[in-house]
Image: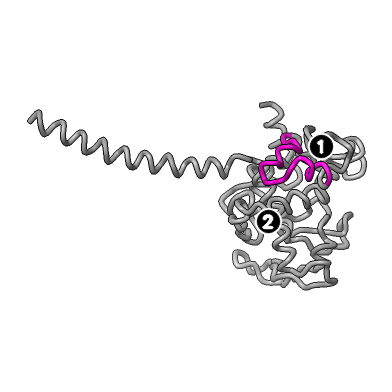
Amino acid sequence: MKKLILALLASLALFGSAQANTEGPAWDKFPTKRLTDMAALQNGAKLFVNYCLNCHNAAFMRYNRLRDIGLTEQQIKDNLVLTGVKVGDLMKAALDPKDAKDWLGVVPPDLTLITRSRANEKGSGADYVYTYLRSYYRDDSKATGWNNTAYPNSAMPHVLWELQGQQRAVMVDQKDPHDPSKIAHVFKGYEPITAGTQTQAQYNDSVADLVAFLQWMGEPEQNSRVRLGVWVMLFLAVFTVIAWRLNAAFWKDIK
């Protein structure tokens, strides 16, 4: 339980506090149908291993649990185990925490539960991460060269920029509606700078697959739980009708 709490707190460190994310642009809706698409989950696992696991742990998930998304143990070993660990080991980053602290100023958080820790009134945690990974823009004033409209001043650089390409944020100066004497910088969208290896639609799909995997990783049994819940509700509905008719027949004889 202590490790679980620490993981949730660490997740907040990189992606910002819930209060901070109540401001700024609205979150885009994560396409939830990806959660039941095995091909999407498998692609998300590949993206996670190649782009996230270099720095971030998923210390509550073992590689062999990926069999639940349709991968064989041999496929996991050949395509997803890149650091020489065993298939039954936990998914831990190759980056040493001390080096991470020295190079980045902060130890990257564990991502096993990231989507479960980010929900607020603007949407689900999956909505937030889906928006966050598509909201990077070039900002030369930052040490990493990147900024993010979903979480301004994020410490994490844009690790997927080769896929998406580079873009700049379009800001327009407008009078603050609450105080006309002040000027507010209002976000109006993005302008492309350089193209990536994927089109924008393809990149959106890739991010959706990655977020689907993160969402699945936070609760691998969620699809089974939902299916079981439907059957339980149907059983209770049928049982309620039967119990109601039995009750009526019992009291009819007594009266």
* Nearer to us in this view, 151 or 124: 124
Residue type at tag 1 = Lys
| Segment colored magenta | 60-78
Quarter of the picture holding the N terminus: top right
**Magenta stretch, overall SS:** helix
Residue 41 visible, this angle: yes
Q: Quadrant of residue 114?
A: top right
**What residue is rendered at 73% in x and 61% in y?**
135
Answer whether residue 63 is magenta in the image: yes
| In this picture, residue 152 sits left or right of residue 94 | left
**What residue is rendered at 85% in x and 45% in y?**
54
* Nearer to us in this view, 138 or 200: 200
From the image, tell me which residue sits under label 2.
130
Query: Which is closer to the viewer, label 1 or label 2?
Result: 1
Residue 184 drawn at (x, y percent) = 69, 66
Residue 81 drawn at (x, y percent) = 83, 42
From the image, tell me which residue sits under label 1.
92
Q: Residues within 10 Å of mark 2 (few under 14, many from 20)?
A: many
Q: Residues within 10 Å of mark 1 (few under 14, many from 20)?
A: many
* Nearer to us in this view, 198 or 170: 198
Q: Is residue 197 above or below residue 103?
A: below
